[in-house]
Amino acid sequence: MNIVYKSSAERGRIWRAMLAELAPDAVFHQWPETGEPTAVEYLVVWQPPENVMQQFPNLKVLFSVGAGADQFDYSALPPGLPVVRMIEPGLTQGMVEYVTFAVLGLHRDMPCYFQQQRTKTWQEHPAVPAAQRRIGVMGLGMLGEAVLQRLVSFGFDCGGWSRTLHHLPGVRCWAGNDQLDAFLARSDILVCLLPLTDSTRGILNARLFSQLPAGASLVQVGRGEQLDHADLLQALNSQHLRAAVIDVTAPEPLPPEHPFWCHPAIWLTPHIASHTQADSALVALLENIRRFERGEPMKGVVDRLKGY
Ligand code: NDP
Ligand code: OXD
């Protein structure tokens, strides 16, 4: 197998060493080194190089190094070229940790208490039992399901929303645009784990916020383009929403004057909710390449019609 890898140099260094053990016959090039371009079969990237098919005319599979694959210009890729996103346990674990941290922080009113600390205010607020806190996760894919599994274990009242109906233990599920408002109406803490598509761009907007219960909070870990910043600020400033934990924004990074940086009800992190872990991701990548070479279905193939 002939692989070109174009992403974090540190991960590439680890992959090269691991490949020597796990797949000694593999030819591994770390961008900008590519070897003979016509020999390249598998390209693993976050951002592909320009004119990817002209550069690598015999490419067999394009792998995203991340869980999302919205960064690709599909019009520049031949329809038959499989595009595969990353499904690997390290990435899932990172997201479970981040969302659990965010949900627990919001559940226990931490943005308010951190703000009180800054003003030297010693004031207690009523605590809500987990069973009475309704969590709603938008997107029940690899990450949303794993997150919900963990949140259920805290005893939260958990709900989930997706395009097609899912059945998850301990989670009440809704599906499709027709059921979105019913799902939102019972989501005290809303977590967005949707992929970026034409249907989800701008979905976190004033209309959606108005459907949430008064005092609800948001955890945004999907993609920046899903969130309308002005609408979120309006919902927070009017105190319809209580707080927001935001990991992804458009643009990234936000400019220094952007109000999110200093807003007392916003926790902002620089797109770090989860990262592809070098060791577990290489195992997943090799497994997918071997599946492809045996003519078996790969895990995480993007459905270009659905857009994810
Ligand atoms: P999956 O493709 O496994 O799951 C996507 C889920 O979203 C599915 O349940 C799908 O529904 C649902 N969905 C898609 N479109 C719609 C829609 N229009 N209406 C309702 N539901 C919809 O994705 P992952 O769980 O692997 O990842 C989700 C996203 O998380 C990634 O695309 C990426 O943007 C983001 N991410 C962010 C990271 C960060 O660090 N902040 C790290 C990793 C990922 P159905 O099941 O019915 O198809
Ligand atoms: C991803 C991400 O998609 O880090 O993996 O956002």
Image (cartoon, rainbow, N blue to C red):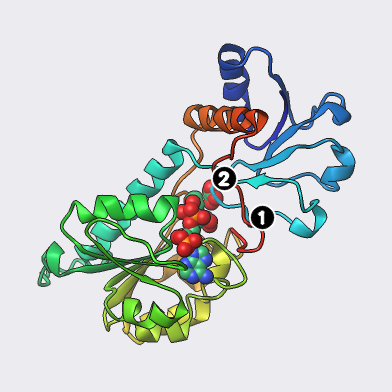
- The residue that appears at 33% across and 81% down in the rendered structure is 182
Q: To which residue does mark 1 refer?
A: 71
Task: Pinpoint residue 51: horizontal percent, then vertical percent.
Answer: 86, 47
User: Is the CB atom of the residue marked by disc 1 within 8 angstroms of ligand 2's nearest atom?
Assistant: no
Q: To which residue does mark 2 refer?
A: 66
Query: Relative to residue 67, is residue 94 drawn left or right?
Result: left
- The residue that appears at 30% across and 55% down in the rendered structure is 148
Q: Nearer the viewer, residue 231 or 49?
A: 49
- The residue that appears at 27% across and 84% down in the rendered structure is 214
- Residue 65 in view: yes
Q: Please, what is the three-letter code of the amino acid marked with disc 2? A: Gly
User: Is the CB atom of the residue marked by disc 2 within 8 angstroms of ligand 2's nearest atom?
Assistant: yes
Task: Name the quadrant containing residue 238.
Answer: bottom left
Mark 2: few, some, or many residues within 10 Å (few <14, many ≥20)? many
Q: Are marks 1 and 2 in contact (CB under 8 Å)?
A: yes
* Structural distance between the alpha carbons of marks 1 and 2: 10 Å
Task: Pinpoint residue 210: horizontal percent, then vertical percent.
Answer: 38, 86
Task: Name the quadrant containing residue 225.
Answer: bottom right
